[in-house]
């Protein structure tokens, strides 16, 4: 599949990518242009709950939502991905009913509408690339590009997303799908 870089795609870390920030990760590319790229790692849940990171927001207290490590940039900032039909004006459309933003009103609506298909995930920090940096990483084979899937973002067990995406890429990647995070432990 020959897919060009752009927002709304998954960057799957190639099995050979050794950078500990991105080893065995899947990044949703949320912004892409001449100024660079911005995304969030979607498969690295932390041990921290969202209410620990945002104690000033009472609606999320006790909701049990985990905070994800979005990337190594600005790890003191919380970013939110929403899936829904209506979004706040300040949200940035990413793809297929998925937006990036920080609107707590949207989070409150999602938490109070039980049974709704709306969902959100919170990320501490983000992944960023300067002009030309991601393109260079693509040339060295660091990333595999596939269309993003909202079900993988909001419904799939994050610990299996990298593996499951590798399995969709065919027999070449099948042996790597069970590779431990640190191959020297094998």
Image: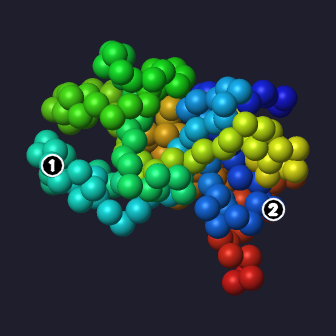
Tell me the residue that label 1 is attached to: 56
Q: Which residue does the image show at 33% across and 27% down from the upper left?
A: 117
Assign a secondary structure to mark 1. loop
Outermost residue to the bottom: 185
Question: In this orientation, which residue lies closer to the viewer: 59 or 171?
Answer: 59
Assign a secondary structure to mark 2. loop
Residue 35 is drawn in which quadrant? top right
Residue 70 showing in the rendered view: no
Residue 85 location (% of width, % of height): 36, 16
- Taking 180 as reference, is 43 left or right? left
- Taking 138 as reference, is 122 left or right? left
Q: Nearer the viewer, mark 2 or mark 1?
A: 1
How many C-alpha atoms fall within 10 Å of the one at disc 2: few (<14), some, or many (≥20)?
few
Q: Which residue does the image show at 23% across and 59% down from the upper left?
A: 52
Residue 178 location (% of width, % of height): 70, 65
Report how many numbered discs are placed on residues in the image. Answer: 2
Question: In this orientation, which residue lies closer to the viewer: 115 or 130?
Answer: 130
- Taking 47 as reference, is 172 left or right? right
In the rendered structure, find residue 16 and report the number of the disc placed on it. 2
Q: Are marks 2 and 1 in contact (CB under 8 Å)?
A: no
Question: In this orientation, which residue lies closer to the viewer: 182 or 166?
Answer: 182
Question: In this orientation, which residue lies closer to the viewer: 45 or 90?
Answer: 90
Cα–Cα gap, marks 2 and 1: 41 Å
Image quarter where the N terminus lies is top right
Q: Which residue does the image show at 40% across and 42% down from the upper left?
A: 79
Image quarter where the C terminus lies is bottom right
Residue 139 location (% of width, % of height): 88, 44
Residue 162 location (% of width, % of height): 63, 53
Counting residues from the start of the chain, the first of labels 2 and 1 encountered is: 2
How many C-alpha atoms fall within 10 Å of the one at disc 1: few (<14), some, or many (≥20)?
few
Rendered view: 106 above or below 76: above
Q: Which residue does the image show at 68% across and 76% down from the upper left?
A: 182
């Amino acid at each position: 599949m020959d897919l060009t870089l752009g927002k709304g795609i998954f960057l799957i870390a190639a099995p050979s990518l050794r950078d500990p920030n991105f080893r065995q990760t899947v990044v949703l590319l949320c912004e892409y242009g001449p100024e660079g790229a911005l995304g969030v790692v979607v498969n690295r849940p932390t041990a921290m709950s969202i209410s620990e990171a945002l104690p000033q927001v009472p609606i999320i207290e006790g909701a049990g939502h985990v905070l994800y490590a979005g990337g190594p940039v600005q790890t003191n900032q919380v970013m939110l991905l929403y899936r829904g039909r209506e979004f706040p004006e300040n949200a940035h459309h990413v793809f297929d009913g998925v937006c990036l933003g920080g609107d707590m009103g949207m989070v409150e609506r999602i938490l109070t509408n039980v049974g709704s298909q709306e969902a959100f995930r919170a990320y501490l920090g983000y992944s960023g690339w300067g002009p030309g940096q991601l393109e260079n990483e693509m040339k060295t084979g660091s990333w595999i590009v596939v269309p993003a899937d909202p079900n993988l973002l909001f419904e799939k067990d994050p610990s299996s997303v990298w593996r499951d995406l590798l399995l969709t890429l065919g027999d070449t990647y099948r042996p790597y799908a069970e590779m431990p995070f640190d191959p020297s432990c094998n």
